[in-house]
Image (cartoon, rainbow, N blue to C red):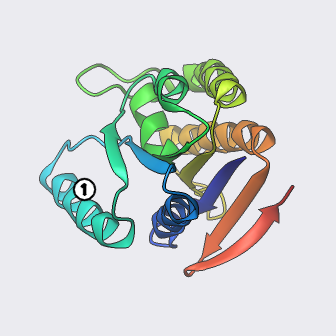
Amino acid sequence: MHELILGGQKSGKSRCAEQRAADWMARSSGHEAWLLATALPADEEMVARIARHRAARSARAPGLHVREVNQDLPSAIEAHATPSRLLVVDCLTLWLTQELMPPGEPPLESAAWLPRVDGTADALCAALARADGPVVLVSNEIGQGVVPLAREARAFVDALGTLHQRVAAACAQVTLMVAGIEMPVKRP
């Protein structure tokens, strides 16, 4: 079963996904869990943030294997999904950012983002359909606030919302995290 966990910044999304992984590993000695981490350490603050995540994760979900995947997430899901392995993808927001604004390259024009997201969502949803084991995807819900003033910010909110709709349709379960509390949105 696949699950999409959405929430605002510091809402408990990653902690919830890590708990899913710990619960999965506790069910059977044959179960393992892998984190497909999408963050790139582009600046000092992000390096520190990644280090804090690693330390907290190792305490909350010992045995969770980490793979850095900041490009071609669909291929990584297909390559690593097995019936005995739960995959945690953390997070779709950073992955989509890197798809639309590749590091070290000029960003795509924001007018081209939605068509790019359609292809990206197609590939991701196809990978989820072919995944042999459970996948838990984490992403930031950013579309509930004030409409941003900048054109690029509005385009990104639209692009991420489009991706979320497509991924939510491909998942049996969707959870919204609010202040560390799980709110079921979609259940099988």
**Residue that numbered label 1 is attached to:** 50
Where is residue 188? Give x, y as percent. 87, 55
**Other-residue count near label 1 (Cα within 10 Å), few / some / many at <14 / 14–19 / ≥20:** some
Q: In the image as oriented, which residue stretches furthest toward the front?
A: 29
**Drawn side of residue 171 relative to residue 148, left or right:** right
Q: In the image as oriented, which residue stretches furthest toward the left?
A: 44
Vertical arrangement, residue 16 with respect to residue 103, above or below = below
Vertical arrangement, residue 29 with respect to residue 99, above or below = below
Residue type for callout 1: Ile
The residue positioned 50% from the left and 59% from the top of the image is 25
- Counting the numbered discs, the total is 1
Where is residue 102? Give x, y as percent. 34, 25
- Is any part of residue 136 visible from this angle? yes
Which residue occupies the foreground of this view, 83 or 161? 83
Which residue occupies the foreground of this view, 100 or 10? 10
Q: Quadrant of residue 74?
A: top right
Q: In the image as oriented, which residue stretches furthest toward the right?
A: 188
